[in-house]
Image: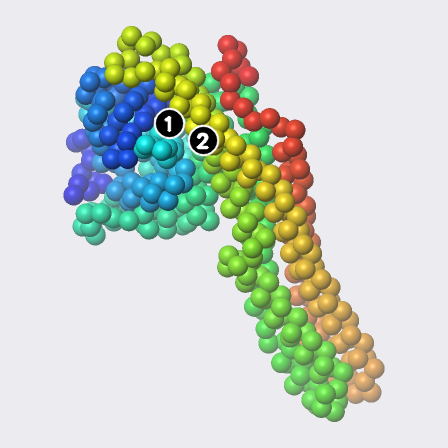
Amino acid sequence: MTSATDLSHHNRRAAKPAPQSIFFSRTDKAAKIQAINAQFQEFSGHDWGNLIGASHDLLRHQATPKGVFAQVWQELSEGRVTSAYMCNRTADGNRFWVLALFVPVDDGFVSVQVPPVSPALEKVEKLYSELLEGEAADGAESPSGEALVAGVQALDYYSYETFMSEALSTEIAARRTAMGRKPEPFLTRFDQMARLSNDLRKQVDEMRGALNGIQTIPMNVRIIASRLEPEGGPITRISEDFQALSRRLASWLTDFSGDRNDAFQNMWKSLVEARTLFCAALLLEEAQLDCAGMDADAAQGVDPEAEATALQSVGTSIRGKATDLARSVEGATYDLGVAVHDLKRIMSSLQMSTILCKIEGERMTERHEGLDQVNGRMRSFLDAIVKQADRATELNQAIQSQAEELHGIEPGFRRPASAA
């Protein structure tokens, strides 16, 4: 296998398509090309006759790790729309990067590819170089996508789907800017919701870390209480209540961070998938418009009108699914609000425990400095974590607000004569 460090002699130069370029191809289930658009043929440098019926591997460049293809095929085999950054090869051996969208259809797959415009490509090239080195060292003929998924998670993305959903939206936004067009409002809302949701996840992770600092407090209170009051006295009972509430809080935070909070997971998955599908619908629509404008006489072996009609049908179906998911996002944000409200109730109960502990301590005829110190630690912890819980509530309310504002915004990607 050729390693990442052996690729230079394969690359006479890196070709760079114009930002407005869009490459369309349709393959059968074996990835043999059935149709392409004129831009695909022209930039690839291959004749129409060499492309139609050929394997899509004809354009495959070794700068794309095998694990990337494995991940794409896994997603497609499960019937999901997916995407990936790919390095393609022209007929004369030059390479060019694209962000490739893949959509399963009845008789195969549709792919729409656009040149990356955002700075994300630099990060991707570095990641792919590391994956290539790993594949070369491993020597496996058919690497899985596990290393790719681990790589994007190391870049602080929750999953590969999250990474590519953001990549699609980011590249579409950068592309529109490069073409002199205004941002797509619908995607802007989704991007803001995704950022807020990620902040909420991180906020909960911080709360979980802070909770580890008070695990010994209830035991310390009970030890001190045993010296100050009869067994089962009020301070002992308060410490037991505090411990039980701490465990409830730990369970809530663990479930949230560990993918067991259905409210957050449903909202997050719907949000990521809806954004991916809206991006797909926008690219499919543009590919449809490009095919509709092709010269039928020049398109050898391809019926541009039929391809445009098929793309319109696929795009309409994808847009419908995205719209349904967008509606479900709003409902999921309210379910999440209920979960966050439960968190606030736990916090309120914990605060009450510290107040009762302080009151009972002051009522004792014999004061104990240790009890005052422990109670002070409890209050300091709660003051800090209550602020974090308040921030979590604010983030959830902001997510709900963004979801509500999706109503009345009509997503679309048109190709007007002037900037949209």
In the image, 133 versus 262, the foreground residue is 262
| Callout 2–callout 1 Cβ contact below 8 Å | yes
Q: Where 398 sits versus 183, above or below?
A: below
* Badge 2 amino acid: Ala
> Can you give x and y, in whole percent of width and height, for residue 248 in the image?
62, 68
Q: Where 180 sits versus 262, above or below?
A: above
Q: Where 356 sits versus 25, above or below?
A: below
Q: Where 357 sits versus 66, above or below?
A: below
Residue at image coords 65%, 32%? 407
> Residue at label 1?
112
Q: Residue furthest bottom?
A: 230
> Residue at label 2?
280
Residue at image coords 55%, 61%? 255
Give the mark count: 2
* Left or right of residue 224: residue 191: left
* Badge 1 amino acid: Val
Mark 2 → mark 1, Cα distance in angstroms: 9 Å
Image quarter for residue 300? top left
Name the secondary structure under disc 2: helix
Q: Quadrant of the N terminus?
A: top left
Residue at image coords 46%, 43%? 162
* Left or right of residue 389: residue 205: left
The mark nearer the N terminus, 2 or 1, is 1
CA neighbours of label 2 inside 10 A, class few (<14), some (14 to 19), many (20+): many
Which mark identifies residue 253?
none
